[in-house]
């Protein structure tokens, strides 16, 4: 539960902007490498926006510039209309950042770490203590609250770092690969917490290498490759743009294969495939024709064990856009 969540002062000036973050021709150069190369983003106020790409694509560099941690070498960036170069102090009041590595003290306990973060963020001693206990419960760390971080596993440390970023809920929360190194159960737990943060008023800017994570969470996705935005849209539209859905027909009997292939091609107008002995797949050029196909198969006394429709995946989107092998879907 996120009940009792502390929030930052609501009297900040959003300048009535519809965008939580905007960049125009944003550039960052390291030597001969243009890590971020004329990136243009418009991140809506509210919801979850994902930057999807492999290591080295430029995702973290974009986050660091938006969070005022490093200065752009070109272009501009704004948070709720406030310039990250000239209004740094205001921007920092509007954001919260969770990086890829733990920003915690190894010699202190989990409870002590969270309490100190709360005090640094301006909470009273009692409020900081209360919030630390709430977060330890949420992240299932209560049993280890008084252990020093030297005794925490890698996953436990990661959870504590994430908890620290949620002590005070900012209008814009940057989560840079927040579930890296977490087990599947904890990753799903984090997804639920991220969704609740949006429901309680925050915008989330998420970077990830996990295709499933972007697909499950994001309202919009920008695919980043070699410092460039190569595509940007909703996950559904990105998948739809690279190809049609595929119809899968699992036959009750292999003896009906040839006739099923013939009827499928006739009714759908596309060339079917036979990847397995009792399986027929075909692109769906016209979804309305699927009903006619099923009727024709029934009239031909062909029994089906199962029928399903598969959309293109974000794996295929990334491969189609960049020529790069698919990203990790279940971790690495």
Image (cartoon, rainbow, N blue to C red):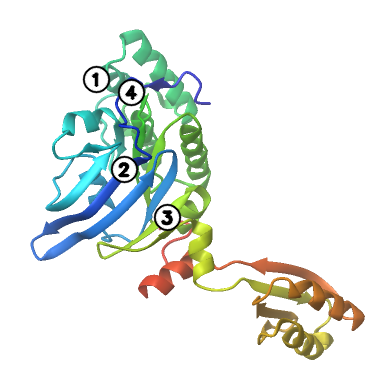
Q: Along the line of sight, which residue is nearer the eye, 41 or 103?
A: 41
Tag on residue 12?
A: none
Mark 3: give few (<14), some (14-19) or many (20+) Cα within 10 Å: many
Tag on residue 21?
A: 2
Q: Residue at x 68, y 82 (%)?
A: 276
The reply to whether residue 169 is in sight is yes
Q: CA distance from mark 1 to mark 3?
A: 33 Å
Q: What element does badge 4 sit on? A: helix
Badge 2 or badge 4: first in the primary sequence? 2
Badge 1 or badge 3: first in the primary sequence? 1
Badge 2 or badge 1: first in the primary sequence? 2
Residue 94 falls left or right of residue 276: left
Residue extending farthest to the left is 31
Circles 3 and 4 in contact, beta carbons < 8 Å:
no
Q: Residue at label 1?
A: 120
Residue 186 coordinates in the image, percent (x, y)? 49, 41
Q: CA distance from mark 2 to mark 3?
A: 14 Å
Q: CA distance from mark 2 to mark 1?
A: 25 Å
Residue 244 falls left or right of residue 297: left
Looking at the image, is mark 3 or mark 4 nearer the viewer? 3
Q: CA distance from mark 2 to mark 4?
A: 28 Å
Name which quarter of the figure residue 98 lies in: top left
Q: Along the line of sight, which residue is nearer the eye, 100 or 229?
A: 229
Q: CA distance from mark 4 to mark 1?
A: 10 Å
Q: Residue at label 4?
A: 114
Q: Residue at x 24, y 52 (%)?
A: 24
Badge 2 or badge 3: first in the primary sequence? 2
Q: What element does badge 1 sit on? A: helix
């Amino acid at each position: 539960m996120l009940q009792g969540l502390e929030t930052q002062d609501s009297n900040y000036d959003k300048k009535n902007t519809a965008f939580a973050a905007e960049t125009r021709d944003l550039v960052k150069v390291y030597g001969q490498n243009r890590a971020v190369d004329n990136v243009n983003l418009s991140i809506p106020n509210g919801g979850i926006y994902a930057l999807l790409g492999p290591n080295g694509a430029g995702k973290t560099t974009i986050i660091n510039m938006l969070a005022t941690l490093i200065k752009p070498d070109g272009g501009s960036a704004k948070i709720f209309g406030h310039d990250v170069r000239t209004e740094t102090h205001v921007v920092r009041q509007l954001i919260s950042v969770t990086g890829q590595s733990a920003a915690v003290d190894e010699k202190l306990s989990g409870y002590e770490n969270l309490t100190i973060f709360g005090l640094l963020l301006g909470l009273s001693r009692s409020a900081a203590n209360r919030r630390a206990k709430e977060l330890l419960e949420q992240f299932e760390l209560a049993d280890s609250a008084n252990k020093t971080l030297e005794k925490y596993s890698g996953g436990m440390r990661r959870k504590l770092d994430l908890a620290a970023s949620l002590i005070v809920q900012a209008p814009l929360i940057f989560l840079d690969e927040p579930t890296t190194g977490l087990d599947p159960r904890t990753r799903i737990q984090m997804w639920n917490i991220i969704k609740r943060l949006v429901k309680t008023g925050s915008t989330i800017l998420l970077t990830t290498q996990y295709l499933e994570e972007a697909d499950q969470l994001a309202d919009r996705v920008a695919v980043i490759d070699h410092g460039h935005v190569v595509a940007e849209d909703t996950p559904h539209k990105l998948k739809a743009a690279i190809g049609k859905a595929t119809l899968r027909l699992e036959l009750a009997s292999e003896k009906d294969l040839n006739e099923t292939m013939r009827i499928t091609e006739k009714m759908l107008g596309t060339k079917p495939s036979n990847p397995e002995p009792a399986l027929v797949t075909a692109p769906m050029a016209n979804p309305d024709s699927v009903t006619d196909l099923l009727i024709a198969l029934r009239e031909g006394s062909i029994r089906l064990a199962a029928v399903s429709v598969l959309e293109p995946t974000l794996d295929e989107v990334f491969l189609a856009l960049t020529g790069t092998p698919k990203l990790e879907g279940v971790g690495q």
